[in-house]
Amino acid sequence: MVSEQLVDLSRLQFAATAMYHFLFVPLTIGMVWMLVIMESVYVMTGKQVYKDMTRFWGKLFGINFALGVTTGITLEFQFGTNWAYYSHYVGDIFGAPLAIEGLMAFFLESTFIGLFFFGWDRLSRKQHLLVTILMAVGTNLSALWILIANGWMQSPVGAEFSYQTMRMEMTDFWAIVFNPDAQAKFVHTVSAGYVTGAMFVLSISAFYLLRGRDIEFAKRSFRIAAAFGLASALSVIVLGDESGYTVGEAQQTKIAAMEAMWDTEPAPAGLKLIAGINESEMKNDWEIEIPWVLGLIGTRSIDKQLPGIKDILVENRARIVSGIAAVKALEAVRTDVGDDEAKATLERHMSDLGFGLLLRKYVADMDQVTPEIIDRAARDTIPRVAPMFWAFRVMVALGFWFLALFGTALWFSVKGDFADRRWLLRAALWSLPLPWVACEVGWFVAEYGRQPWTIYGVLPTHLSVSTLSVSSLYGSLAGFVGFYTLLLIVEMFLMVKFARLGPGSLGTGRYTNEPAHA
């Protein structure tokens, strides 16, 4: 059995590197399409200011992209160093989208980024616009394949366990690609990136307007960001609803934890706005609820029930008992491949094999399992409710704030007097960090809510780790956090430096000390 400290440190290290990496990814995904919009307007109108906008915001995009690549490479290496058994167990499936991402999306993205920066004087307007579009496509393809891999971890389709190889093996590549969970996760995640990119441009443009500098440049940037941001915020909310439906279909434990739903409620279940969560007694001391909403989101019906945590525990306990039979049968087959009775037993209980493996956290021999151990393993299948509940509400509240802010910004942009609304400009400026908060808590809900599984219902987290020393993990964790913090400081320094310089950093002479005018 693997020590709990080793598992916790391995999880903490991966979480730290992933969360740092995800500080850069949303901005990359969102900014690139804004560059496409700005350059498209330049090609259509021939106005120099739109070319300058593309080059200036592209410079900030490039800084962020470089840091994102640096932090992202480490994550893939960790599958081999920290999660060796995971890589062995599911590498046949998980490795495919990661390999495609590297060969197709990443190289496409990187190639056209080079052409974007160095092709302004070598390519025609239309050719350079095509480069920018392909750069955006590559960026989104990169996200697609990563999220297909992650979606399979959340909802493992198109694969089955082989007792001959003791691994999961792919049976249907296209089922993995078109996995509803993966597709919903992709569109929701990239929409969140679009909101991040729009807020970045909106906030910095508001900063220029508040300072009364680079007025025409800032006005045009603000308008584009407001329109793109409103569309993106609407997409996040609509696609978040779709993501909630797929979670309700594939991970009912997660949605019950997100909603602090301890008991199965009559359909359609209500959505809790806030609640006083009492995890020790498995109840809410108080709650404010909107009737029907959760049932409609989670089931798309008014008569289908969503199970509560207590009923899920009962079901999972039964699956653990069934999983014991699967584990014992698997051990018998490994001892004697000709044992047809054991094969038949394994086949009957195969769907619960992962639940039986949860017991390996406590015992090595299934004959040593007691009802108390089964109860502990069943309780492990429910993530802590309070962090899930409140993190989800922070994400949702921020989503509606973005909708209100971008909607207001676009309204006054259409009226033409947004530059005089200093309260709006201040709201935009102070909202700059909020999309990152929303992205991080959203990622937390998705990943923490999957626990105790690396592959939901298939492979427990405590079985996935490599055999490492605790001291080496402490050292590498400290190294990663220190190095990534340094990279984050470098990123923020460069971003603040060039944002403060503004379009004058292009050296065109058109923006330095530009007088303020309407």
Image (cartoon, helix red, strand yellow):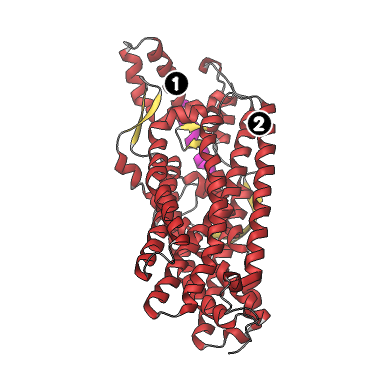
Quarter of the image with the C terminus in it: bottom right
Q: Secondary structure at mark 1?
A: helix
| Residue drawn 57% across the image and 44% down it | 448
Residue at the spot of label 1? 327
Q: In the drawing, does residue 17 fall left or right of residue 237?
A: right
Mark 1 nearby-residue class (10 Å; few <14, some 14–19, many ≥20): many
Corner quadrant of residue 296:
bottom left
Q: In the drawing, does residue 375 fall left or right of residue 172?
A: right
Q: Between residues 250 and 75, which one lies in front from this camera angle?
A: 75
Distance from the alpha carbon under mark 1 to that under mark 2: 30 Å
| Residue drawn 59% across the image and 77% down it | 509
Q: What amino acid is at disc 2? A: Leu
Residue 251 seen in this snapshot: yes
User: Which range of residues does the magenta coloring cover?
Assistant: 309-321
Residue 482 higher or lower than 518, as above or below: above
Residue 343 higher or lower than 301, as above or below: above
Quarter of the image with the N terminus in it: top right
Corner quadrant of residue 176:
top left
Q: In the drawing, does residue 382 fall left or right of residue 178?
A: right
- The number of numbered badges drawn on the structure is 2
Say if the magenta span includes residue 316: yes
Q: Secondary structure at mark 2?
A: helix
Q: Residue furthest bottom?
A: 518
Mark 2 nearby-residue class (10 Å; few <14, some 14–19, many ≥20): some
Q: Position of residue 508 (x, y in %)?
A: 56, 75
Q: What amino acid is at disc 1? A: Val
Of tags 1 and 2, the one toward the viewer is 2
Residue at the spot of label 2? 473
Residue 358 higher or lower than 487, as above or below: above
Q: Residue furthest front?
A: 122
Say if the magenta span includes residue 240: no
Q: Position of residue 255 (x, y in %)?
A: 50, 50
